[in-house]
Image (cartoon, coloured by chain):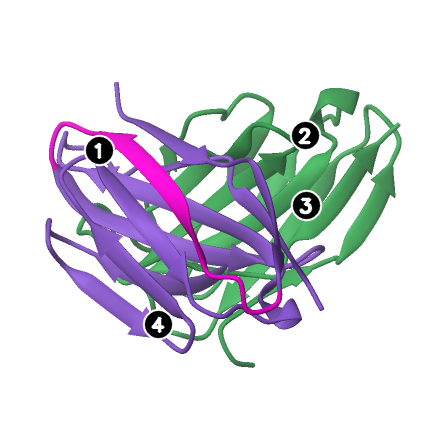
């Protein structure tokens, strides 16, 4: 593994179903992030984590939850998916949060909620 | 409120036709300004980080510059493989973690 991996690559999901998007990084970065990207709106932060064991809310956190049990993994869970959560989801990581550090992005998960 | 505006939204160039992309920003204090390239169906790929006005960075046909209000991504003699969406983001010093992203410039370079 080199950088950030995300799984699945794409998913079609029925509304009301639970879904976990996976993210793993091998750069030993302290900080990790989840974004969604929608046409015309750019990238918006969902949740972030400063370090293992801590998480925080971003700009659009409603309907999503995260956990950070270790340095490498940062899963994003949709407890009960709704069509407005149809989007492309990107995981990112950086050395630190809020220090002007560069964020590096994964390849994304394209999620469709019907 | 921190804000980023990119222009133009879309740009078509002939191969070899140099141009510039603009990123205007409003931020309480700048920690960093970041340029990314994004190809269709892929994640943003890091290009440059700029930290202070007057700073410049170059990579192949790309050069990024920074003033107190805006950044430019200059593309010299572009090739078709430079076609992509270019994203700009800023991080301010207001005490939060957030990157504020612009909506990007879609660049198409014609052979």
Query: With B20 as the anchor, is A96 left or right in this view?
Result: left
Instruction: Return the residue at label 3.
Output: A20
Residue A50 can be seen, yes or no: no
Q: Within the image, what quadrant is residue B56 found in? A: bottom left
Which mark's residue is nearer the viewer, 3 or 1?
1
Crowd band around label 2 with a 10 angstrom C-alpha radius: few (<14), some (14–19), many (20+): some
Question: In the figure, B81 relative to A91: above or below?
Answer: below
Tell me, by letter, which chain the rendering colours green. A
Q: Are marks 3 and 1 in contact (CB under 8 Å)?
A: no
x then y, percent, for residue A33 = 43, 47
Instruction: Return the residue at label 1.
Output: B96
Are the residues flagged by discs 1 and 4 from a single subunit? no
Q: Secondary structure at mark 2?
A: loop
Q: Are marks 1 and 4 in contact (CB under 8 Å)?
A: no
Q: Give the spatial CA distance, label 2 vs label 3.
A: 8 Å
Mark with earlier residue (2, 3): 3
Q: Find chain B in the image and tell me its colour.
A: purple
Q: Secondary structure at mark 3?
A: strand
The magenta stretch is B15-29
Specify the subunit that label 2 lies on: A
Crowd band around label 3 with a 10 angstrom C-alpha radius: few (<14), some (14–19), many (20+): some
Which quadrant of the rendered structure holds the N terminus of chain A?
bottom right
Instruction: Return the residue at label 2.
Output: A79
Q: Give the spatial CA distance, label 3 vs label 1.
A: 27 Å
């Amino acid at each position: 593994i080199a950088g950030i991996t995300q799984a699945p690559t794409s998913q079609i999901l029925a509304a009301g179903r639970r879904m976990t998007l996976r993210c793993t990084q091998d750069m030993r970065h302290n900080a990790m992030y989840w974004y969604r990207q929608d046409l015309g709106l750019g990238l918006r932060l969902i949740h972030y984590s400063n370090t293992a064991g801590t998480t925080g809310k971003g700009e659009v956190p409603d309907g999503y939850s995260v956990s950070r049990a270790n340095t490498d993994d940062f899963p994003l869970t949709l407890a009960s998916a709704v069509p407005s959560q149809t989007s492309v989801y990107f995981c990112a990581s950086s050395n630190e949060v809020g220090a002007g550090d560069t964020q590096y992005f994964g390849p994304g998960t394209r999620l469709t909620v019907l | 409120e921190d804000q980023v505006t990119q222009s133009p939204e879309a740009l078509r160039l002939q191969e070899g036709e140099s141009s510039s992309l603009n990123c205007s920003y409003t931020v309480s204090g700048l920690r960093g300004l970041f340029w990314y390239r994004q190809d269709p169906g892929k994640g943003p790929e890091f290009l440059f980080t700029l930290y202070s006005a007057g700073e410049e960075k170059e990579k192949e046909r790309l050069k990024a510059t920074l003033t107190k209000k805006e950044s430019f991504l200059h593309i010299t003699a572009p090739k078709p493989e430079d076609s992509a969406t270019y994203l700009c983001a800023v991080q301010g010093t207001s005490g939060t973690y957030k990157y504020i992203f612009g909506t990007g410039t879609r660049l198409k370079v014609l052979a």
